Amino acid sequence: MKNTIKTVKLLIISGLLSIIPLLTTAQVMGPSDPGAAPQGQPIGGGAPVDGGLFILLGLSALYGGKKILKREKPADK
């Protein structure tokens, strides 16, 4: 009985937390005149993503490799 109450509470809380992103939407830019010049930067800004992404992927691969090698080594004490 106690376990089912915890499960129901967990389902309700996770359901409410999954609805929050749907309720908090950002402001949408209105349609612009097709003949006019573009206004400002595109949505998300003009920051490049590719350089930082490859750095993070490389560092995560190194970290994962280190963890695998450390797991396979016998412990010397």
Image (cartoon, rainbow, N blue to C red):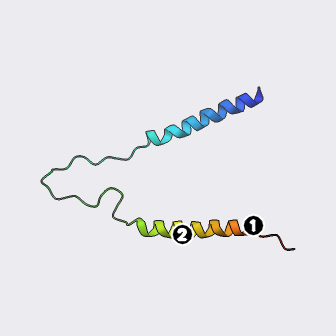
- Label located before the other in sequence (1 or 2): 2
Q: Quadrant of the N terminus?
A: top right
Indicate the position of residue 44 as horizontal and vertical percent values. 36, 58
Q: Vertical placement of 10 versus 62: above or below?
A: above
For disc 2, the marked residue is 58
Callout 2 amino acid: Gly
Callout 1 amino acid: Glu
Q: Quadrant of residue 17?
A: top right
Position of residue 2 in the picture relative to residue 34 (left or right): right
Q: Quadrant of residue 23?
A: top left
Q: Quadrant of the C terminus?
A: bottom right
User: Dot 1 lies on which element?
Assistant: helix
Q: Quadrant of residue 15?
A: top right
Q: Vertical placement of 70 versus 44: above or below?
A: below
User: Dot 2 lies on which element?
Assistant: helix
Distance, label 1 to label 2, CA atoms, is 21 Å
Residue under the image location 69 percent in, 66 percent down: 67
For disc 1, the marked residue is 72
Indicate the position of residue 8 as horizontal and vertical percent values. 66, 30
Position of residue 67 in the picture relative to residue 29 (left or right): right
Q: Residue furthest left?
A: 35
Q: Residue furthest top?
A: 1
